[in-house]
Amino acid sequence: MLDPFLAKKPKPSYLGHRERLRRRFETSEFDGLLDHEILEIILACIIPRMDTKPLSWDLIRSGFGVKS
């Protein structure tokens, strides 16, 4: 019988998010990204060890836009 404590749990969806975003940027540059995703990439360069998604959303909501 399989012990439920030993069963593998699925990985959270946020793991690898920054790498997936980076790959999308490499293939389509800014045209393939939403405003908050562009901000995430920029902020990740400035703040490398922090989840920048909430901050990018806060900036967007406050009226900061990237694309004109």
Image (cartoon, rainbow, N blue to C red):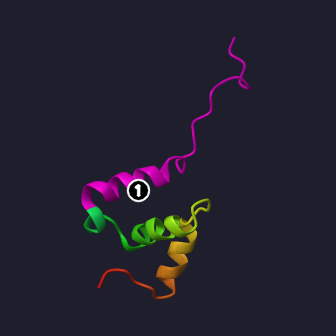
From the viewer's side, name the closer residue of 38 and 61. 38
Q: Is residue 38 above or below residue 4?
A: below
- Residue 53 image offset from top left, x and y in percent: 53, 66
Q: Is residue 22 above or below residue 12?
A: below
Residue at left 48%, top 55%?
18
- Residue 56 image offset from top left, x and y in percent: 51, 73
Mark 1 — residue? 21
Figure disc tally: 1
Residue at left 57%, top 39%?
11
From the viewer's side, name the closer residue of 2 and 13. 13
Residue located farthest toward the top when viewing the structure as drawn: 1
- Residue 42 image offset from top left, x and y in percent: 45, 70
- Residue 1 image offset from top left, x and y in percent: 69, 11
Residue at left 40%, top 83%?
65
- Whether 6 is among the magenta residues is yes
Residue located farthest toward the bottom when viewing the structure as drawn: 63
From the viewer's side, name the closer residue of 61 and 43. 43
Residue located farthest toward the front when viewing the structure as drawn: 46
From the viewer's side, name the closer residue of 41 and 62. 41
Residue at left 54%, top 69%?
46
- Whether 53 is among the magenta residues is no
- Would you say 18 lies left or right of 48 here? left
> Which image quadrant: the C terminus?
bottom left
- Magenta span: 1-28
**Tag 1, which secondary structure?**
helix
Corner quadrant of residue 66: bottom left
Q: What's the residue type where badge 1 is placed? A: Leu
- The crowding category of the residue bearing disc 1, from other C-alpha atoms within 10 Å (few below 14, some 14 to 19, many at least 20), is some
- Would you say 35 lies left or right of 46 here? left
